[in-house]
Image (cartoon, rainbow, N blue to C red):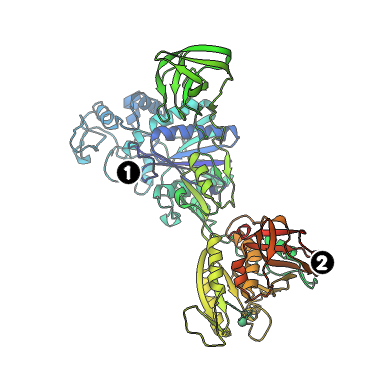
Amino acid sequence: MIVDSVIMVDWSGGHDRGATPKRDAIWTCIARAGTAEAPVYHRNRQVAETYLRDTLAAELAAGRRTLAAFDLCFAYPTGFAERLTGTDDPLVLWDWFADRVEDSPAANNRFALAGQINAMFPGTGPFWGNGRPHHDVDHLPRKGRDRAGYGLPEHRATDRAAPGAFSPWQLSGAGAVGGQVIMGFPTLSRLRRHFGPALSVWPFQPPDTPLVLAESYFSLLPTTLLTDHPIRDAAQVALYARAFSALTPSEWDRVLDQDPTPEGWVLGLGHADLLARAARPALTPPPLRNDCFAMPQGAHWTPVDEALAHLRAHLAPITGTETIPLMQAAGRILSVPVTAARSHPPHDNAAVDGYAFAGPLPAGPHTLPLHPGRAAAGQPFSGTVPPGHALRILTGANIPAGTDTVVLQEDTTSSPTHIALHGPLKQRANARRAGEDMGAGDVVLPVRRRLTPADLATLAACGTATVTVHRPLRVGVLSTGNELRAPGQPATHGQIFDANRAMLLSDIAYWGHTPVDLGIAPDDRQTLQNILDDAATRCDAILTSGGASAGDEDHMSALLQGTGSLALWRIAMKPGRPLALGLWQGRPVFGLPGNPVAAQVCALVFAHPALAVLAGGDWPVPQGFDVPAAFTKSKKAGRREYLRARIANGAAEVFGSEGSGRVSGLSWASGLVALPDEAAEIGPGTPVTYLPFGSFGL
Ligand code: AMP
Ligand code: MG
């Protein structure tokens, strides 16, 4: 059988858990083809039931067969249902409970109801456990050992086969599941009634419907497979959703091949081997190929655009993924698209303060009687406004039943009983429509998106509590050269201060990666090799500067040569010497030139987009714009030139020297002017392309 979507549900028997995601609340996660979306937090059963009904409806509408599995017993041990309903059909028992359970976010009657049920059996039991220390509940013993003579088994057959399963009779104490079973049946019953013949319940009914409900149990897989989501329940639903959704159709046939015992059966029980295989995380992408930097030979100098196209075509994400709270996700890169958990706005609501009525109103003066009450944001009006009446309404309030249009307060005069206004007013004026911004189930943000502050607002608005993102890319920075000293260290003449490391580490932080300081390496092959070996254990990628050419002391290129992965790119650009690219123990290494200006320009032009892709993001293309030149230059053909530049009076002026060692010119500049590969005669007023440093992610 083909199952397109799997929804895992971690149910709860307790009260409302508040707005902040917490453990022991209700968590759900939907997965398709082995990829789970971010787990969704539900503060109480009411919102969870709405979400489940909407999500199942959306999957049904999209033509995806969907299995939703709940971690609650779908039936009680043999004999129980028969006593209450006269039949052993668990689905009849669901309806029986739906008629008797009282449930609201603040309170429910699960203990009292359990006591009433106990009274229907001989002896004392079967339910036991009382969550309230100072209130006895009639017929409900506090201890399991105080029960006797009720004549029912403690466990179902499937619970006896599932290691560590609790008895559904136990209503309180650590690990107890009895409460959530009682508080789950009404929701299951309503979902069945809502979807009618489109929905079946496994294993009681054949699962050949578009929607299937089943019972799950979150102890089938080793806990080592859980990702490090800060909330275990969230990690659990994500793992089980991902694992089940990765099953092949024939594996589903095996898992679902179960006789329809009225005691029910845990989905996947007895198939731990299949599940464990399916759950094996595809956490770390395959390594880069050893020849990923190899440039096609032939061209003497490689044009910049060709070099960029090559990198773009051969690089891929190298970091695994994790699911984290939205609040911590600024700057992180989505590895799974985010779909809206609910519409935004969720309901039609008022865009202004004023009065709501049924529109439209024709031209001319009108007087409308005021209906008592008011609608405010967070305090919806529960009644229906009679035709021809108006109701006081405030911005953000749900549009009350019987109305669809709002008149701005300033456009009315009012008495305690009436308002007067002038038409015409179009129907739905000043009303925001439910879902006009985002619809439930819409893809709101795509994969490879680096989350901006605004993205966090967008995702929060449609109910996203957690996101699945790439782990941060750890990028090491190493300076090489015998002449280098760290600023603050004593330096003899002949020695210079290491300018590149501070700059490149800071670039990496600006780009949203995790900088790793690898210090300074002397021009000594063995030492350099040891440093790279160590770096490969704690970095995902490495930037080095200096020693990248083919001279005697250019050990960086010599070492990469030894790995068989070196590519010395002779790029037709100024500034820039050869760019040494290679893999050190599988880690991409970007050997940048030593001169600070060349190091930075090569970092901005090549390392910035390359690292973005390695981190899981989109390939960024710097957005420049044409401005008139404020300088004169005769440019030769055959190479791209990047000049340190800044804008003054609407024109681009360039730094006085093109010397690649003149690091202060980088501080003087606010961007680069890129001159095309062809020859060019530039004078004051000639349009040139200016790329602000911001367009390189700084
Ligand atoms: P190299 O590529 O190693 O031949 O270095 C080219 C030039 O850049 C030499 O003048 C080096 O002294 C200088 N240089 C190399 N690395 C750095 C650094 N980290 N900071 C400042 N200058 C450097
Ligand atoms: Mg050097």
Q: Give coordinates of residue 585: x percent, y percent.
A: 58, 72
Quarter assignment of residue 667: bottom right
Q: Give coordinates of residue 365: x percent, y percent.
A: 54, 12
Reading the image, the residue beneath label 1 is 166
Q: Nearer the viewer, mark 1 or mark 2?
A: 2
Residue 349 or residue 654, whichever sits in front: 654
Quarter assignment of residue 686: bottom right
Task: Answer with the quadrant where ligand 1 appears in the image.
Answer: bottom right
Which mark is first along the chain, 2 or 1?
1
* Distance from mark 1 CB to nearest ligand 1 atom below 8 Å: no
Q: Is residue 99 above or below residue 73?
A: above
Q: Give coordinates of residue 198: x percent, y percent.
A: 54, 29
Specify few, some or many for label 2: CA neighbours under 10 Å numbering under 14, 14-19, or 20 or more: some
| SS at mark 2 in the image | loop
Residue 308 or residue 682, whichever sits in front: 682
Q: Residue at x 76, y 58 (%)?
A: 685
Quadrant of the frame with the C terminus: bottom right
Q: Is residue 258 above or below residue 504?
A: above
Residue 687 or residue 542, whichever sits in front: 687
Residue 527 or residue 374, whichever sits in front: 374
What's under tag 2, amino acid-wise? Ala
Specify few, some or many for label 1: CA neighbours under 10 Å numbering under 14, 14-19, or 20 or more: some
| SS at mark 1 in the image | loop
Q: Which mark is residue 679?
A: 2
Q: Is residue 552 above or below residue 606?
A: below
Residue farthest along the front direction in this orientation: 649
Q: Is residue 351 in view from this perspective?
A: yes
Q: Residue at x 41, y 55 (%)?
A: 223
Mark 1 to mark 2 CA distance (whole Å)? 79 Å
Q: Is residue 648 above or below residue 296?
A: above
What's under tag 1, amino acid-wise? Phe
